[in-house]
Image: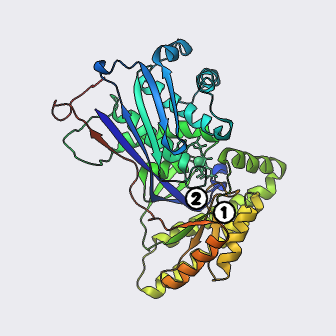
Amino acid sequence: MEVRARAPGKIIVAGEHAVVHGSAAVAASIDLYTYVSLRFPTPADNDETLSLHLKDVSLEFSWPVARIKEAFPNLENPIPPSSCLLETLKLIASLVDEQNIPEANIGLAAGVTAFLWLFTSIHGCKPAKVVVNSELPLGSGLGSSAAFCVALSAAILALSDSVTMDFSHQGWQVFGENELELVNKWAFEGEKIIHGKPSGIDNTVSTYGNMIKFKSGDLTRLKTNMPLKMLITNTKVGRNTKALVASVSERTLRHPTAMASVFTAVDSISNEVAAIIQSPVSDDLAITEKEEKLAELMEMNQGLLQCMGVSHASIETVLRTTLKYKLSTKLTGAGGGGCVLTLLPTLLSGTVVDKVIADLETCGFQCLLAGIGGNGVEFSYSGIPDIGANGGNLS
Ligand SMILES: Nc1ncnc2c1ncn2[C@@H]1O[C@H](COP(=O)(O)OP(=O)(O)OP(=O)(O)O)[C@@H](O)[C@H]1O
Ligand SMILES: C[C@@](O)(CCO)CC(=O)[O-]
Ligand SMILES: [Mg+2]
């Protein structure tokens, strides 16, 4: 009996960073996913380990269940979604340290820590095999950390008593509203371990999919009324969301009044973006007008992200390159490198798109055209035992 879960990555159309400080932001899911499979061994397997295989980085970690019990003598489970206390983080860190993660992959330690917190909080010290793989570039602004946490939470919860298991359904299925909320809350706790101070927008859009407006923890699901086509350019410059979020907070401490104005301006931009995306369109002309407004708002948002100090020379190169074709570009996600968005108007010819891509690729960047605004998290069971629908507790 195995469960598979998949959670999408995302783009932020407006409002990254400012959203951490209470401004509105607009994000959409993209059709690139992180997949997690989870299986509990049968008694015949005689396997008493908890293992985590991270296929994207070709690393596998495992802990004898007895070792986890020893590290967590007072482990309570299952518990409702809650933050990992500093004391517990230290206990988990000792389990992660023992795995000798290569220095080059040290950013993974936070992800492995998040996994151990999510798994043990819901299942306790239980043997299991977990495998993760992703279509998303890791650490590049497309929400890989959130997709990782959402897919993990979904798989872990789908084999727990918190979810009513329906084995009659073949293929990908969606959670009910209460279950989605639970997945999202747990994923947010995982993001906290990876990011330090996430706003919650990335895990929320990965959980619910489509396009959302997000402000101070409040989600508004947007009804899009226009096709949105973006070119995503990966500068391939590595960066770390936790460090970039911290750098903006430090700048805010140094210049509170100026930064408050920047965040207010971003709030207005995001609200306007959300209104444009939702307003009805009558004809092509109306779409063109909306696209022109969106393009201008993206440029304004990019200027404000520069004010926050999260742009990068590679991002500026993408901006200059796309400007030659009169296209508007902004960074997406935490910036500092990573991925950049360019709005592709509906009437832009395929030949021009090809030229822009060729130009960007000559600079050493990687371009992709992802579908925007698809499904959120989904899961599926396989190797189902013959016990009928709603088989109950399989532990
Ligand atoms: N497929 C994966 N396998 C293992 N760890 C992952 C995976 N995806 C994400 N992670 C974890 O998330 C970290 C990257 O998160 P980070 O927030 O820096 O980037 P991002 O989420 O891609 O970008 P952004 O937050 O700007 O959207 C990795 O260092 C790792 O700890
Ligand atoms: C930079 C940030 O605003 C978006 C990262 O995708 C961080 C967050 O909101 O948690
Ligand atoms: Mg992230």
Residue topped by disc 1: 266
Name the image colouring.
rainbow
Q: CA distance from mark 1 to mark 2?
A: 8 Å
Measured as percent of width and height from the top left, residue 72 is found at 54, 16
What element does badge 2 sit on?
strand
For disc 2, the neighbor class at 10 Å (few under 14, some 14 to 19, many from 20) is many
User: Which residue matches tag 2?
Assistant: 25
Q: Residue at x 68, y 67 (%)?
A: 302
Give the residue displayed 58% in from the left and 58% down from the top.
25
Q: Counting residues from the N terminus, which is met first, the one under dot 1 or under dot 2?
A: 2
Callout 1 touching callout 2 (CB < 8 Å): yes
Seen in the picture, residue 227 relative to 158 is either above or below; the reply is: below
80, 132: nearer the viewer:
132
Q: Amino acid at mark 1?
A: Val
Q: Nearer the viewer, residue 43 or 20?
A: 43
Dot 1 crowding, Cα within 10 Å, few <14, some 14–19, many 20+: many
Q: Is residue 386 visible?
A: yes
Location of residue 223 by image quarter: bottom left
